[in-house]
Amino acid sequence: MKFKSLTTAAMFALSATMTLWSAPAAFAAGTDAQQIALGHKLYNAHCASCHRADGHGGVHFAHAVSADLQAPGLEHTYHENDALILRAILQARDEDGDRLDAPMPKWEGRLSQPQAEAIVAYLHTLHAHHGHAAKR
């Protein structure tokens, strides 16, 4: 009986260890369905009025036009780096750190970091068929 208990305990420990090893990879991949669903909800509430429900943008604001978030150019523009996309959302700064056109608000203080991350996860679903994946 002791041997069986030890084996069960060892299997449990191994399972827990494997879960811990794989959890960061799953989180980093941004594949959490709940995070994407939250991002979709937040996108619809805060972003869709300018970037449209499907993310294709093109809304004119005097001298500015809202960005197409479906285009594979989003990842290219932001060097396939989610941190730069987050900066665009939270601080209204482009890939070079310059201020985005005035209609784009700074969402910092209105959206939390996890909420902005959820929006980024959702944005990746708008153009996942293009085969681009940003660094996380």
Image: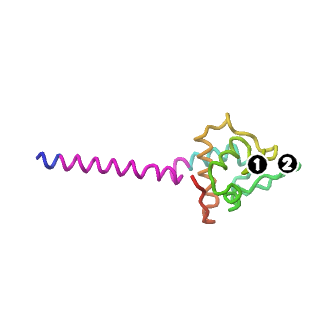
Q: Residue furthest top?
A: 109
Q: Residue furthest front?
A: 96
Asked if residue 82 is among those painted magenta in the image, a careful observer would answer no
Residue ID at (68%, 37%): 108
Amino acid type, residue under disc 1 in the picture: Cys
Residue ID at (33%, 47%): 16
* Crowd band around label 1 with a 10 angstrom C-alpha radius: few (<14), some (14–19), many (20+): many
Pinpoint residue 98: horizontal percent, then vertical percent: 77, 46
* Crowd band around label 2 with a 10 angstrom C-alpha radius: few (<14), some (14–19), many (20+): few
Give the residue at mark 2. Answer: 61
Amino acid type, residue under disc 2 in the picture: Phe
Q: What's the mark number on residue 11?
A: none
Pinpoint residue 10: horizontal percent, then vertical percent: 24, 48
Mark pair 1, 2: CA separation:
9 Å
* Above or below 113: residue 54: below
Give the residue at mark 1. Answer: 50
Secondary structure of the residue carrying tag 2 is: strand
Question: For the magenta stretch, what is the residue range?
Answer: 6-35
Asked if residue 8 is among those painted magenta in the image, a careful observer would answer yes
- Give the quarter of the image for residue 55: bottom right
User: Label 2 near label 1: C-beta < 8 Å?
Assistant: yes
